[in-house]
Each structure stands twice: as structure tokens, then as C-alpha cells.
Amino acid sequence: MLFFFLAAGMLIGCMQQPATAQDSWAVYVYMCGSDLESMYGAATFNLNALRSVQLPENVKFFIQTGGAKKWHTGEISSDALGRYVYDQNGFREIAKLENANMGAEETLKDFLSYAKENFPADHKMLVFWNHGGGSLDGLCFDERYAKSLSLPEVRQALETVEKANPEQPVFDLVVFDACLMATLETANTMHGYSRYMVASEEIMPESGTDYAGWAGALAQNPSMGGRELGTILCDTYIPHCTENEGEDMATLSLIDLAKVPNLNAAYEALGREALGAAQSNPRMFYTTFDRVANSVENYGFNSGDLWHNMIDLGSFSEKLTSLGTAADFTRAVKEAVVCRVVGPYRQHGMGLSGYYCLDGSPMTLAKYTTLPGASPSFSNLYENMLAGSGDGDSWYHFDVEKIEHTPVVFDQNNTATVTLTPEDANSIREAAFHLSFLDEKERLVFLGSDCKLTADWDNGIFRDNFDGAWPALNGHFISMEIDEQQDDYILYHSYILLNGQKCYLRISFHEETGAFEIIGAHRLSEDNLLDRNVLQLKQGDEITPLFLTSTGEYIHGDSFVLEQAPLLQDEPLPDGTYAFAFQFTASRNDVAFSEYGYLEIDGDYLHVIPNEP
């Protein structure tokens, strides 16, 4: 029963309003197809689901299409912007426009203006359909023009067409059928223009929301308001994701935008208190602060050259127990998120994410400061955190070169230990061990990193638990890198070729059962952007592991075909020479490695090589 409950999703705090009069509804759908449509027909999938619903006379959908090189629906042109109506008389084209960039502010403004003039209603709903990149990268990526809408552009387009009115916003509900948009910054963008917002903190599966489910409910009861309809969107989401094999990492939140001013005030107060608390011992404060931020759920892709920098704000503040205003902000989040549904690997958030400089980059911070509702105090806090006090000397910055090449000591049981001073240990936010093997070209080939070690932070002593085994997929070793560690599970990723396509494979490890589970694979574009489609590995798939070398290039491991259902489990490593190091990460995402220790595996025998081979 517990498994079924988790797989079906978790409904938290979802409340509905009583029905009122039988009013009219107009739903405006800004459908930027992008590669989701041209490659996979995902927009067509959702349109077909919508068209399965028989609408009453007082419910109409106005849909604008574009942004894709190819549309799989015959009625929709691939070489023009299309405008369509779906109502009780069916689906029909009402205008065909010259192609334009769906990721441009002007195109969105024209769409909103036309909708306002031609489709008035007692209740209005706005749907953004496409990719989403969180607060920093916006949404509605047009693959023809390689451009997305930024949140400031969305806000400006709204302001051009409508006047913000928090007491009587123009929309009952705005829905982001796009990844990573359940953010405080998105809520600030829509404040004054919508009563409620539905969005996902995490990457949304390609199947999106359940159009047949929520549109069907609206058709049956047009008397409902935005809160009730938003609740239905949440109620139907996880079962819809489960049906399409994408529920494991799914999230969806219904946010009351009337609570945004209170959210902002509480967030600003938290930032001011944090700024003050950092004054007495900046290094200690910022390291602790950064540890907390990296311990909560983070969303999207946060590795290599691509960082979405989105964390769950409610659980972040809940863990900041040393700050008195943190409880006020946590309470404000819980009041604003009136409904939240999640899959089994997203149980630890509260439904609202926001920017945190996970990558330690001043460039992402500069982008954050331009967003609607960006917090002045948190902007200052992050600036101090990244750049120091401003007097030429860093407030707290820990020079990781101090611990670079720290000696590794092996005991008689081949357990590796590294010892830092307590001061240095309390200047880093996380520790892991890093494993490589020496290939025939004498290159180090990275197997990956793991956090399964023993850490005595007070005394700066770190010991590994390496036992000569590593995860293998159906008997073939793959690289594994940590994404996130929670009390009950660890999330990893691995790069593979799946039937020739580069993919980002998500994996979990259950602490209680000691077993791995393959969550699914996301295709990667040439720009290393994650595709929304969740691919499940299956018998007959061809897998090619990808490994990073010490020269900075990825090489292909041996390809193999899954002859049976996929199974990932620890297996003894083959004979050879392996390099082991501790990996320490400080605030600002600076990384240092201890010196390497070298191990030789020969059958069941594992021994330390005294000198570098």
C-alpha cells in the first residue's frame, strides 16, 4: 500500500472552493512546439487529448501554435503561426500568420492582445506550453529562432496588454506546462495578473498535464473557479505521469498568488537576518548556509556547464534553524502552496523553488537580480558570498588549494583516510570519494564519485567505505556522479548512449533496501539541454557507457545490448589499477582533491600500490 501511495503521488493541502454561477471560460494556450513537437509529437499528443473532450457552449480554447520545425497535426502548418479555436463546434483555424519567434516578447504580446479582444469571458486561463528553464532561463524555446522568453519579457508583455490588479486579476489561473517554473520569481512575474498559478518545480515528463482530465472536468462544471480547476490539474497529474512512465521525479504545485506580497516580505526579512548573521563569522556562516542549500531538493540539471540553480525554498528555510525569521518564511510558503503533488523521489520539497547560486557563478547572480521580485537582501547576500566584502579581501572565501593534494593514508584493511584541520573541515560544504581506473593509454578514466564515506566533521577525519565494487548495468560498469543526497535515498546520474542517442540517466539508491533503481533517461540536445521525455530502459536497447578522462574528453565504453530487463547493482571491479581520491567542495562550488592513492585489484585481492604507477 505504501508503494502504491508513493507511485501514485502525494497530495498535500489541496482544498477546493464551492461552485458559483454557470459562467463562461476562455482558455488561452500559447503553444510553442519546439523539438518536443517536431521530434516527438508531444504538442499533438496534448491537443488530441483536449479534442477528445466535448465542450459546452460557455467554454472555449484559443490556441496559438508555432516554434516547431515540424507539426504532426495535419491541420497545423509547420511554416506559419497558427491561431485556432476549440469549442462546442470542434477544432478550426481562424488565422494563419507569418512565422514569428514564439520566444519573443512581441509575439506573446500580440497573442495576448488578440485573445483579449476576441475571446472575452467571465473566467480566463492562460497556458504556457513548451520547455522551461527555471527562473534564469525562462520558457517557450522556439527552435526556429533559438530563443526563449525571459521572465522579464513575460511580465513586460502582460503589462503592455493589461494593467496589473492584485484585487481583480485578469486570469483566474495561469498554467506552466513547462519544466522548472514553480518558482518564487515566476510567481512574482504573474502577481497581479492571475489569482492562482500551476507549475512544476522539477522537469515535467513529455506527456505534460492531463488535458483530457482537467479540460473534461471544466466542461462538466464551468461554474468552478481557478483554485478548484488548479486542484484538479494537480489531482490528475501524477496518475497521468504514471500512465506515461514519468512519475518518479514528477512535481506539480498550485500557488495562491495573493500570498506573493507576504512571501516577498518574509523572504526579504530572512535575507536581511542572514546578512547580519554573516558579519560575525562569515566563513562559518556561509559554509553552513551553503551546506543547507545543497542538502535540499535541487531541480533540473546542475552539473558541468549547465546549471539551473533552483532549490526548494520551503525546506531550505525550514533547515535554517539558527535564523529566527526562517520559520516565518517557511510558514509563508506553506500558506501560498495550497496544493502539491509529487512522485516518490520528490517527497522532501514544499512546492516552491527559487534561485540559489549552486554553481557559484557571478553571471547567474547578475541574471537573478534582473528578475521580477528579485530580493535585494538575498542579492546582497549572494554577492558577498561570491565576491567577499568588497574591500579587496574576501570575507570568507576558503582557498581550496590549502587542502589540494592532502595525503591519503591506508590502514591494514586498505581503508583510506584523509585528515584536515577542524578549521579547514568546517570551511567545506561536502565530501565524497572519487574513483578512476588507469586505461591502456595510461589515462585516468573516471568511474565517478560517491558519498558513501564516514565523515567526522568536528575533527576533520574522512574515511572511505570502498570495498572494490562499483555499480554495473547488467554486468557492465557505468560512470556514476552524485546529484543529491537525502536521508532515505541518493540520486545519481550517468552519461550513456541509448540506441545511439546521448542521454542523462537518472538513478536512485535506497538507503533502507541498499538497492539501486533506474528512474529513466533524458535525451540531451547538442547544447546539453535535457529533453522532457523520460525514456525507460528496456530489453533490446543498446547501451554505450560514456566516461570522462583526465584529459577532459569523453570516451565510449564497450557497447552492449540489454538481453534481459535492466538491473543495476554493485559488482566486483575487474582486475586492474585504480586511483582513489577524496573530493572536497567549498562554497562558491570550488573543488579540491586529496592526493591520489593507487590500488591494485587482482581477483579477490585488493592492495595498495606504494608509489604512483
Image (tube, grey):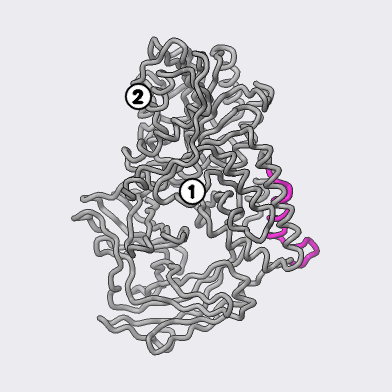
- Residue 145 lies, with reference to residue 416, above or below; the image says above
Which residue is at 61% across, 75% downward? 401
Which residue, as the protein is rendered here, is positioned at the far front? 18
Q: Which of 494 and 444 is in front in this view?
A: 494
Quadrant in the picture for residue 220: top left
- Residue 547 lies, with reference to residue 263, above or below; the image says below
Q: Where is residue 431 in the image (x, y as percent from the top left)?
A: 51, 70
Quadrant, the C terminus: bottom left
Question: Would residue 146 be visible to someone looking at this image?
Answer: no
Which residue is at 41% across, 68% downward? 446
**Mark 2: which secondary structure?**
helix
Q: Position of residue 601 (x, y in %)?
A: 31, 80
Q: Identity of the amino acid at label 2?
A: Asn
- Residue 295 lies, with reference to residue 450, above or below; the image says above
Quadrant in the picture for residue 208: top left
> Is residue 388 found inside the magenta-colored segment of the image?
yes
Report the magenta residues as a range.
374-394
Q: Name the residue under label 1.
A: 300
Relative to residue 498, is residue 204 drawn left or right?
right
Mark 2 crowdedness (10 Å alpha carbons): few <14, some 14-19, many ≥20: some
Q: Where is residue 13 in the image (x, y as percent from the top left)?
A: 50, 39
Mark 1 crowdedness (10 Å alpha carbons): few <14, some 14-19, many ≥20: many
Question: Would residue 84 be visible to someone looking at this image?
Answer: yes
Which residue, as the protein is rendered here, is positioned at the far left? 563
Q: Nearer the viewer, residue 281 or 597?
A: 281
Q: Which of 121 and 179 is in front in this view?
A: 121
Of labels 2 and 1, earlier in sequence is 2
Q: Mark 2 points at which residue?
A: 48
